[in-house]
Image (cartoon, rainbow, N blue to C red):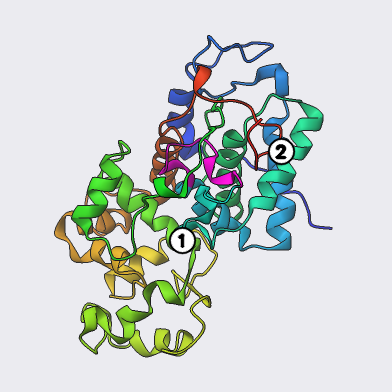
Amino acid sequence: MASVINFNPHSLFLPLFLVLAATATSTTRPYTFLPRPRVGYYGSACWNVESIVRSVVQSNYFTNPANAPGILRMHFHDCFVRGCDASILLDGPNSEKTATPNQSLRGFNVIEEAKTQLEIACPRTVSCADILALAARDFVVLTGGPWWPVPLGRLDGRVSLASNVDLPEPTDSVAVQKQRFAAKYLNTQDLVVLAAGHTIGTVGCGVFRDRFFNYKNTGRPDPTINPNFVPQIQSQCPLNGNAATRVALDLGSEGQFDTSYLNNLRFGRGVLESDQVLWNDPGTRSIVERLLGLQYPFLLFGPEFARSMSKLSLTEVKTGLDGEIRRVCSAIN
């Protein structure tokens, strides 16, 4: 049986914790008039919420490590459409799940498993949106990434429509990416740092293959790709191969949370065009260089990722009459 991993915040994250925890108060129940979301929101109403989610995450990570990038991506997709309200989890013929970018999402069973356990321990108390935010953090930690305090108290949304899904595209320019992130109150540094979450990600060949064979109908690969990198990807994603075959976005360091992904961009080894342009554009390149320790003032990737993830997780959260606490994550009450 896999050993239990202890999640201990690194001292580098202490300032962030103090900021987020400042509003936390001792309480026995999650009264609706208290600020939400906030760290420690559930109090004694569900004192073991984080340990329950963590246990489920650990068992599912050891069973299938691919759940880590799957849940991180799911959380991002959820927050970018109508905010972090677990609308991505709802079933339905025209729900967000059915939109093309979401059809390859995985890990829904992990969230439902955690919800089932929490409904036993704390009935009708913990939202699916909070479970997803906690699970994303805990999976990142298991890949070697940072720990951060997750503010809790989100409510679950009641609306989930495929027609609302408008996510960043793999061919987006830096200008377009900036616009998309700014619409969610995330700045350019957040954009680069969150994109670097691809360090543990994979992508289907059908998403990017043209870039390595017939870029913009030129009959040639994208000229910004390192020539030595082209045959490596072409062999993994042959022109007439299975479009669903998945390739690591951080070749050489797959499944490990580190700066290898950023270093790959530096040498023209970005798989996605939307990633590679972050190095090619002078404005975002300076952020990449600071994260790699090549330009002063330096940025530490772990703490910066934690800060940006915390900001992302507070995007357009539902409170009050705007949401609910679902009994099961795949259906509204």
Residue at 52 percent across and 50 percent down: it is 94
Locate residue 118: give its quadrant: top right
Residue 51 in the image: state x and y as whole percent. 71, 36
Q: Which residue is mark 2?
A: 115
Eyeballing the image, is 323 above or below 281? above
Amino acid under disc 2: Lys
Which residue of the protein is positioned furthest toward the right in this rendering? Answer: 1
Do the CB atoms of the residues marked 2 and 1 lie less than 8 Å apart? no
Secondary structure state at the residue bearing disc 1:
helix
Amino acid under disc 1: Thr
Residue 100 at least partly seen = yes
Residue 222 at least partly seen = no
Locate residue 262: give its quadrant: bottom left
Q: In the rendered structure, which segment of residues is drawn in magenta?
A: 78-91
Q: Which mark is residue 100?
A: 1
Q: Nearer the viewer, residue 183 or 6?
A: 183
Which residue of the protein is positioned furthest toward the left in this rendering? Answer: 282
Using a 10 Å C-alpha cutoff, classify the residue at mark 1 as few (fewer than 14 neighbours), some (14 to 19) or many (20 or more). Answer: few
Mark sitting earlier along the chain (2/1): 1
Using a 10 Å C-alpha cutoff, classify the residue at mark 2 as few (fewer than 14 neighbours), some (14 to 19) or many (20 or more). Answer: many
Q: Does 156 appear in magenta? A: no
